[in-house]
Amino acid sequence: MATIRDVARISGYSISTVSRVLNNKNYVSDGVRTKIQQVMDDLDYVPSDMARDLSRGKTMNIGVVSLNVDHPYYLDMTAGIMTAAFAAGYNLLMLPSRYKNDEERGYLEQLRRKAFDGLIFTTHNIPISEMLHYQKYGRIVICHDPGDEPILASYSDRGPSYMQAFTWIHRRHFKNVGLLLPRDPALSATAHETIAAYTRVFGQQPDRRMMRYDTMTYADGYAAAEYFISNGLNPDFIMANGDDIATGFAQYYKEHHLRVPGLMGQDQQLSGQLMGFPTIDHHYKDVGAAALRLAIGAADESVGIHSDFIAERK
């Protein structure tokens, strides 16, 4: 396999001149550029991406840790990251997460070995404290409020919209409210904020029986409805972790000829718009774009993007 040294030797020019041709730099005449290009064509010379990355100190790759789940959080977040990466000339490496600590630590080790320039955790299971050591190897961005932790973050500022949503529910005198949550609140910032807002508005924590975890899809919403009915819980209102999830919940009731309770979704999906129930728009595409800018160094301060409670669909 030909090397840049072979191109320089055969063309009669220095390695630095060949390098300027490869990188389309100035200060090379058209005649010299043509001759060097001809030698490269004759040798079928292909520049080494690894060598190029080492020379410029960048891979132009960003790792994105994400669940392979059909939920707007991950779909819209990835879309926002991808759009911003394309505009900035960066490539994305999608790194599947199964909430396995060893896998997440492995991605941090890849960052240390310069497999990519930065790492975005759209979700994570390991504590932030484990990530801090790796910040010297590249930028690490998380996608929830970091609190007092010294780490970059782009996230949806859900707190105010959750307070508005539960106040709306409370003022309509719903009392037996079911919550469909992504994960245990000890592990999920979304679930933690949901329960905190409920508690502030209703003056007490929700009944544990009225909370269903791991609800991420339409099918999960359908299964949650079956759980409530089979256990005789009879909620008069459901706050779901997504419009599709709320729609799945309603479908179970309809199929079993039951009166559908009040519903509220999240993420302003088409299903919720067609059914007309309230929702919350968390602007995840904007969150993803901001995360990418942080990861490549185009921004330096964490950002919380305001989410919007939408009581009436237009």
Image (cartoon, rainbow, N blue to C red):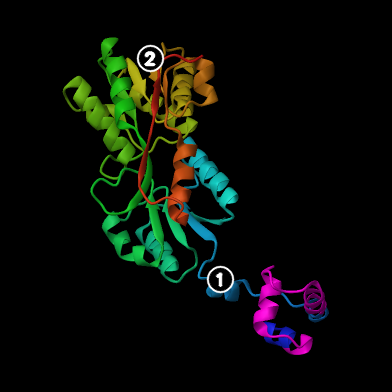
Foreground residue, 212 or 273?
A: 273
Which residue does the image show at 46% across and 52% down from the upper left?
298
Which residue does the image show at 66% across and 76% down from the upper left?
19
Which residue does the image show at 47% across and 34% down from the upper left?
217
Foreground residue, 45 or 197?
A: 45
Please state the horizontal and vertical placement of residue 89, each as a whole percent of the image: 59, 55
* Amino acid carrying mark 2 in the image: Gly
Please state the horizontal and vertical placement of residue 269, each as a whole percent of the image: 51, 26
Q: Which residues are magenta?
A: 9-38
**Sequence-earlier tag: 2 or 1:** 1
Please state the horizontal and vertical placement of residue 186, each as a whole percent of the image: 25, 43
Q: Residue furthest left?
A: 203
Identify the residue under disc 1.
53
Q: Say if mark 2 contacts mark 1, CB within 8 Å.
A: no
Q: Is residue 66 left or right of residue 89?
A: left
- For label 2, count other residues whose C-alpha is less than 10 Å away and answer few (under 14), some (14-19) or many (20+): some
Query: Which element is circle 1 on?
Result: helix
Classified by dominant secondary structure, the portion drawn in magenta counts as: helix
Identify the residue under disc 2.
262
Q: Is residue 3 left or right of residue 297?
A: right
